[in-house]
Amino acid sequence: MEHLPRIDLKLLRYFLAVAEELHFGRAAARLNMSQPPLSLHIKELEQQLGTLLFIRHSRSVALTHAGKILMEESRRLLSSANQALSRVAQIGRGEAGRIELGVVGTAMWGKMRPAMHRFLKENPNVDVIFREKMPAMQIALLERRELDAGIWRMATEPMDGFSCLRLHESSFLVAMPEDHPLTARDAVPIAALRNEYFVTMPSRHTDWAFLQRVCQTAGFSPMIVREVMEPQTVLAMISMGMGITLIADSYAQMNWPGVVFRPLEERIPADLYIVYEEQQATVALLKLIEALTDPHVCRRQACIR
């Protein structure tokens, strides 16, 4: 295999100036340097390539065939290099980049939605990839450095080297069929749900494991009559009168025909948290965290409920 010389991009810039000017003096002035060192650099480039690039006459300079090809390639290479360096500089300033963001589905509504919309509009060169995962899976992906940050509702003890930040205050609501007697109340005591049938997602989903413990603390175990995989299916079944559920207040932002939401007398927090590795956080990620943060509730903490 032929050995190819490692050419300094600086030499290509010198060559391109001479190739475009076809005059060493004008090229030297354009480069803000004197002519003798410029001539030496061009000879150095020719020696490295093993071919003449210019035909030198007493009063004129012309490109050889090799020189014409190199001029075309130099323009392409230098343009590509400038674009690459510009993008790296943008990434360093947080103006460009890619963020792999783990989220739970309920986080995509409520206060996060307008904040995220504003961030994406103001930072069009930042590509945010949403990966909808439950918290346990997000934690595993964070540990493997396959996510830049994870967003979920259930607070957990962060891994070593990771930070946990509460983004927004939120609460769980009771979702009921529109003809349910409890819809007459402005707020529902948790104890009033003792004899109700619940439609939920599987208990392995963190929200439901937590909510079962909340009910048990209130003195009863919820009577679960249906388990489905998606929250929209839960709400569809509730609209059919098949039971009630506890769900994050972000879902009340949407219209669910046949479903009525009521707050609980005893607030059950569904606060939104973001977990990330602070030392590895890019400028773009820090800008995103700032954009998503509600300054009235944001605080670092152990994130244990």
Image (spheres, grey):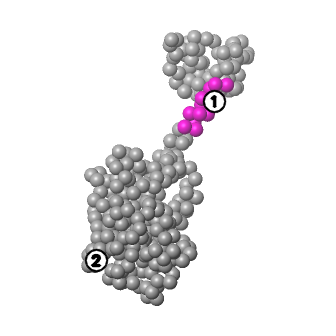
Q: Nearer the viewer, mark 1 or mark 2?
A: 2
Which stretch appears magenta? 72-84
Q: Position of residue 240 (x, y in %)?
A: 51, 74
Q: Position of residue 252 (x, y in %)?
A: 50, 74
Q: Secondary structure at mark 2?
A: loop
Reading the image, the residue beneath label 1 is 76
How would you rate the neighbour count of disc 1 (Cα within 10 Å): few for under 14, some for 14-19, many for 20 or more?
few
Q: Residue at x 54, y 73 (%)?
A: 256
Q: Secondary structure at mark 1?
A: helix
C-alpha gap between disc 1 and disc 2: 72 Å
User: Who is closer to the viewer here, 128 or 15?
Assistant: 128
Reading the image, the residue beneath label 2 is 220
Q: Is residue 136 above or below residue 36?
A: below
Q: Which secondary structure type mostly characterizes the magenta part of the structure?
A: helix
Q: Residue at x 45, y 55 (%)?
A: 132
Q: Is 17 left or right of 128, judged from the image as shown?
A: right
